Image: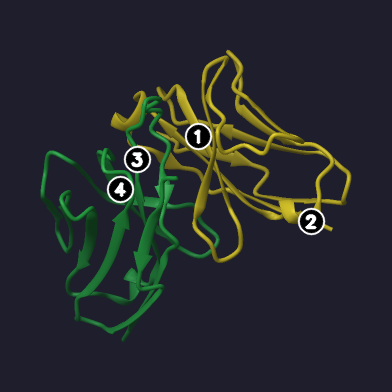
Chain colours: A green, B yellow
Amino acid sequence: GENVEQHPSTLSVQEGDSAVIKCTYSDSASNYFPWYKQELGKGPQLIIDIRSNVGEKKDQRIAVTLNKTAKHFSLHITETQPEDSAVYFCAASPFGSSNTGKLIFGQGTTLQVKP
Amino acid sequence: NAGVMQNPRHLVRRRGQEARLRCSPMKGHSHVYWYRQLPEEGLKFMVYLQKENIIDESGMPKERFSAEFPKEGPSILRIQQVVRGDSAAYFCASSPNYGEMGTQYFGPGTRLTVL
């Protein structure tokens, strides 16, 4: 079935360094790839998303790249700050015949930014 | 503009009782998704609804679980005869658009504990 693999499961960086989280997906027809940030006790917050007609998208310190041939996409956070510490989830929306937009999530990456 | 609202935020039930979780989508959004998050895991899709219609319930357990999104009022996720394995965080997300074109915005979640 549809599957999204996310790595690493935990990531610790020094403040100011960059952080990279990678995801692979199984459904080659997936067209939409959002990234969510989840802080303890809160709901997931959309931070950036990319659609399959674009290879890269950037928003200030956050960027996402998409390689449809290899079926993987990555989140890049530059100049990390302690407030970036959270759990990050990637997701893919399988196209399929129903095309209902349901999201298939990765397992999450716990990012810790050390001051 | 208020975001997605969910209540209650915390719900404690004893085995065999019923749990009712409510979700009010963002203003102008007519699409609601429910997801379940087990401790230290990613979110799993349960059901997708539009007003008065269940569009995709492929992730919903066949027994004890039901969902509705009436013409008036919030979407309801109902769990009958709860068991300990139902303990999880339940999130709803709303979207203004149909299918994979619709960005999903999440609520704060309801944390269900079954004693």
Q: What type is the residue that disc 3 sits on?
A: Ser
Residue A100: % across, % down: 41, 28
Tell me how far mark 1 sits from mark 4, CA to CA. 15 Å
Q: What type is the residue that disc 1 sits on?
A: Tyr
Q: Give the left or right position of residue A114, taking residue B108 as reference.
A: left
For disc 4, the marked residue is: A34
Tell me which residue sits at (55%, 33%) in the image. Answer: B58
For disc 3, the marked residue is: A93
Residue A38's disc number:
none
Q: Chain of mark 2?
A: B
Q: Secondary structure at mark 1?
A: strand
For disc 1, the marked residue is: B33
Q: Are marks 1 and 4 in contact (CB under 8 Å)?
A: no
Q: What type is the residue that disc 4 sits on?
A: Pro
Q: Are marks 1 and 3 in contact (CB under 8 Å)?
A: no
Q: Secondary structure at mark 2?
A: helix
Q: Secondary structure at mark 3?
A: loop
When the figure is inspected, residue A76 is found, relative to residue A11, above or below; the finding is above
Q: What type is the residue that disc 2 sits on?
A: Arg
Residue B60: % across, % down: 62, 37
Tell me how far mark 1 sits from mark 3, CA to CA. 13 Å
The crowd level at tag 4 (other Cα within 10 Å; few <14, some 14-19, many 20+) is many
The crowd level at tag 3 (other Cα within 10 Å; few <14, some 14-19, many 20+) is many
For disc 2, the marked residue is: B84
Residue A6: % across, % down: 36, 64
Q: Chain of mark 1?
A: B
Q: Tell me the quarter of the picture where residue B63 sits.
A: top right
Tell me how far mark 2 sits from mark 1, CA to CA. 23 Å
Q: Chain of mark 4?
A: A
Q: Give the left or right position of residue B42, taking residue A9 as reference.
A: right
Give the mark, 2 or 1, whose residue is nearer the N terminus: 1
